Amino acid sequence: MSAKLDDLIHVLRDSDDAEALAAAATQLHNSATPGDLGRLMELLQDDDFFVREAAAWPVSELAGPAALRELLVAYQRGFDDGHDNDGFTTALVALVERKKAVSRDVLQDLADDVDPAMRENAIWLLEFCR
C-alpha cells in the first residue's frame, strides 16, 4: 500500500476539503494491513494532526493494546495543539472496549507513568475497561 499510503497522507496534510479529508482517513483505515503497521506507527508522530488522527484507527486495530503508549502520546499531542480529538477518542475507546483485559493491564502500568498527561489519559481510558 506504500504508494497509496503516500497519496492518502498527501491529502491529509494538504487538503482543506473536509470531505476529502474524511474520505482519505476512511481509505487509510479500511486499506491498512499488518505490513503497514511500521509506517502507521511513524505517522502517530507526524507534525500534522489529521495524519496522526487518521493513523490512530488502523494502529488501534492492527497493533491493539500494545500500541496504547504511542497512541496516548499522539492523543495528548492533539490536545496540546488545540484539537478536540473526537475521532481519536472514539478509536481509543473502541480499542479498550474490544480488548478490555489486555488494555486494562497496559493502562494500569501507564497510570503510574512519570508523565502527568500519560497518567491522566491512562486513568481516563481505564474507565472504559470495566
Image (cartoon, helix red, strand yellow):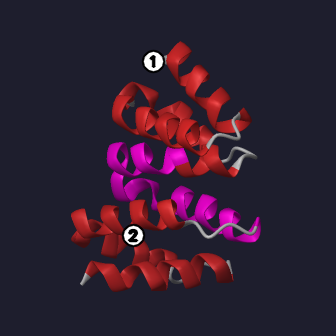
Q: Residue at x 72, y 46 (%)?
A: 48
Name the side, left or right, on which 68 lies relative to 43: left
Magenta includes 60? Answer: yes
What's under tag 1, amino acid-wise?
Met
Q: Position of residue 40 (x, y in %)?
A: 52, 37
Image vertical order of residue 25 relative to residue 82, above or below: above
Q: For the point 61% across and 48% down, which residue is it?
A: 52
Which quadrant would the N terminus be assigned to in this image? Answer: top left
Establish if 44 lies above or below 12. Answer: below
Where's residue 123, x and y in %?
Answer: 47, 85
In depth, the one of 49 and 129 nearer the eye is 49
User: Residue 18: x, y in percent?
Assistant: 59, 45
Q: Say whether residue 127 is visible.
A: yes
Given residues 86 and 106, the one toward you in this image is 86
Mark 1 and mark 2 lie on one chain; the one further toward the N terminus is 1
x 43%, y 46%: residue:
59
Residue lying at the far top in this picture: please name it: 3
Which element is circle 2 on?
helix
Q: Which residue is mark 1?
A: 1
User: Residue 114, can we see it?
Assistant: no
Residue under label 2, please give it.
106
Q: Quadrant of residue 42?
A: top right
Q: Pointers 1 and 2 in contact (CB under 8 A)?
A: no
Residue 80 lies within the magenta run: yes
Marks 1 and 2 sit apart, C-alpha to C-alpha, by 30 Å
* Segment colored magenta: 54-81
